[in-house]
Image: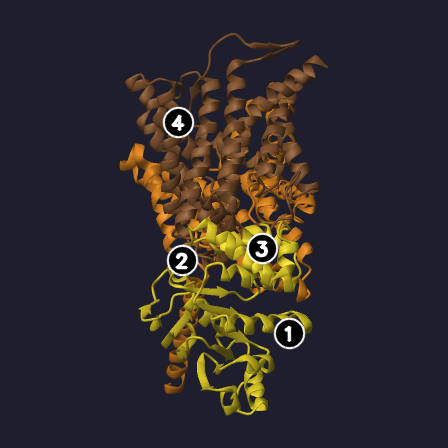
Amino acid sequence: MDDHWVGVLSNIGVMSFLALSAYLLLLTGEISFGQQAFFAIGAYAAGIGTALWGWPLAAALGWAALAGAAAAVLVGLPTLRLHGLYFAIATLAFAEMVRILFEMWRYQVPIDGELLGPDGADGFRGIRYVFESNIEPSQYLAIIYALLGAVLLGFLLLERSRLGVSLRMIGEDPELAELNGIPVKRCKVLAAGLAGSLAGVGGGLYAHLTTYVEPRTFDVMLGVHSLAYGLIGGLGTALGPVIGVAIDISVLESVRMFAGYRMIVFGGLVALLLIWRPRGLLDETVVHALKARLRSACRCVWMSARVGETRR
Amino acid sequence: MLEVDGLVTAYGKIEALKGVSLGVERGGITCLLGPNGAGKTTLMMTIAGILRPRRGSIRFDGADLVGRTPAQIVAQGVALVPENRLVFPQMSVRENLLAGAYQRSDSGEIAADAERLYERFPRLRERREQLAGTLSGGEQQMLAVARALMSRPRLLLMDEPSLGLAPIVVDEIFRIIGELNRDGTTLFLVEQNAHKALQVAHRFYLMEQGRVTFSGTPGQLAEDEVIQRAYLGTRRAAV
Amino acid sequence: MIDFVQNTLDGVMIGSSYALLALGFTLIFGVMRRLNLSYGPTIMIGAYLGTLLHVDAGAGAAAVAAATVLGAALAGVYVERLCFAPMAAGAGIASMVSSFAIWMQLEQAAILVLPRHTYAFPPLAAGAPLTLGPFLVRLDHATMLIAAAALATGVYLVLHRTRFGLGLRAIVGNPVAAHLVGVDVRLSTLAAFALASAVGGVAGYLVLAVDQQVTPMFGMWATFKGLIAMMLGGLGSIPGAILGGLLLGAIEAHAQWYFGPHIRDLVTFAVLFLVLVLRPTGLIGEAPPAEAAAYGRA
């Protein structure tokens, strides 16, 4: 695989964490315009971990997840009482505050005769752990996708768990969920915390992929993009947001003939897609049908195996 | 006056009306009774043009209503007082009445009609500048009826006018229904209160599970059986 | 004290255009119960149409203003047709994301037509500032305030004194009931969209004429200023939109004066956050209709 595609795939993997973070909250019926804040917090936390404190990558990513989760729970407690647009705008306000604070924050430490660390609006340069540890880009790609695979597996388990069902119920109708004895508030805070940790890990991976982070990267546009990915790919399964990211980054990347018209074509396509499928490509109905087909296919294989056995 | 024939209305794959046929005679009060989920509200919403039927026809004085917009149907002279009243909560009583006359442009006549309705509903006159959202349930029902009358309908559809109201208010509503009919308005109403409905109706229909299962005049079926079927459905349907 | 009054004065005057932005936003939200993220970009398209006339044909202020407003209204109609009209009830998030996709599209369209980063925008009213005792009032600021007040009054009159306005308020109150009294909801919604975008176009024109330059980023700026002002004042309330806009202008002016531009934005977002958390209905918003609060699930 050439370097270009390793880079593209790495980007898809990293952005998928952010898209899944927004998707998780969307499952509970809440729109967040602010998941990029936890992505930023994760990026700074992990960068500081390896570059300033000399931690190994795994520890730094864990710390990024923790920081993202803690921040999300902290901001979730007052804001999750709100609903719909109120919640969306509160998260937006919070995320913009975080971005501006990072633009003002300086925490520089001399490492090997060089000043490293967050430097206000100039960002945080020299997060070189991956390079210095002789991890090849393709190896780093494998790390990203191993973690992403673990997260998707987690989503698969979540969908089958009580918590997953509770979250979808809350998304459908919070009052009804409450009446059915689901602790709505607690479930939402939990979902927000998990979503924060996902964004945090994604941010940590992102910082180590690009080796530098700038506060202006984490603006509202990033947040709205991450939300849009779920709706493009589909809200029926956790694969949806990942597909959404892949469509945005890879398809656009490869269709270079559109050069100056790229967003005109893509924006129009997304608008038409949403008319056709308002809950994305892999919406609940499609996922349900696919699952049913998969199940009957499995049953066929199993049956024919049994038939084979008895014949023998 | 109104002829519904073979009407099928569906929500996705689920058919709420499975071929409904019935008629409403000019000058009379026609009642539609049936248990919850029988499709009564769906029928009303389909006649009013809010829902689009999959098959069948709705003819009103010879004109086909299927495929027309709600606005065109109001212009034809059919008005619906919807279930749960649906007044405009942030508008005053006076403005709600004005909105009822949205299709009309004869402002002098509109004012005169509003004045006549204030005569009929004195409570509304008292509260004419109050926001509709602050009215009691009974007052909101009066307002919803008055609002519908502002379009000068030849046929007034009413969906569960007594829903959630105190008995004394229900009596009041049915008194008004009788009055309106004497003054020449044709009425077609959906009711849960079978006893009250049979008192005023000239003709009634029973609807169960998306189909009309009985039609006749109030004397034709014992009230007990009507009530039984209107609330619980027939045994055949329940199986 | 003089500084304080002067800052408030400046802030309120700038805030008058925020109020107009919020007013357009509130109109769309009230009628649709959906968020139009493309609101600012439609205004930007109008402004770019005006700029094109200015750059290519040397059009004057009046022609540029007319083109801006008309262009914004037309772009608004485009957004409504593509992102809102075809979406079924219950697809509120799809509309919002779709309007975001169209935002990207409009931004790139603007860059294709006028590729430089900034363009000059013709000024509104040049001349020496007026003096009011110890206070100074810029002529263009004063024009902005007067124009905004006149337009807000006009919108109020349209909503409360015309048949079209009655229909719109009926849709805001209850869309099904609006259908039942005979309002052509689809047509009225489209007209409301065009009107709101035109109001935004006026706001955009006023702001740009004071700044005397335009960039494609103006779309994002206008969406977020309008959104913040609307939420500050109270969702779905027209007096709330006006108050929110004026207040946002005043907060920005003071914070800028005392702390500089960086902290200014921080203060703005902190105030917004606190208002939402402590008083979610905004400063003078009514208790929100259930659908408004729950539009996320719609």
Spatial CA span between label 1 and label 3: 45 Å
Work out whether A173 lies above or below C108: below
Q: Nearer the viewer, residue C116 or A53?
A: C116
With A91 as the anchor, is C171 left or right in this view?
left
Q: CA distance from mark 3 to mark 2?
A: 38 Å
Residue type at mark 1: give it: Asp
Question: Across the whole image, how many numbered discs are drawn on residues?
Answer: 4
In the rendered image, residue C259, in percent from the top left (x then y), is placed at 66, 19
Residue C189 % position (x, y): 43, 47
Please name the residue that numbered disc 4 is placed on: C47
What is the display colour for chain C?
A: brown
Name the residue tied to disc 2. B71
Rate crowding at label 2 as few (under 14), some (14 to 19) or many (20 or more) other CA atoms within 10 Å.
many
Identify the image's colour scheme: rainbow, by chain, secondary structure or one colour: by chain
Q: Which of the chains bears the disc numbered 4?
A: C
Q: Crowdedness of circle 1 by 10 Å Cα count: few (<14), some, many (20+)?
A: some
Measure how far apart labels 2 and 1 are at the Cα level.
31 Å
**Looking at the image, residue C208 lies above or below residue B237:** above
| Viewer-proximal residue among A112 and B62 | B62
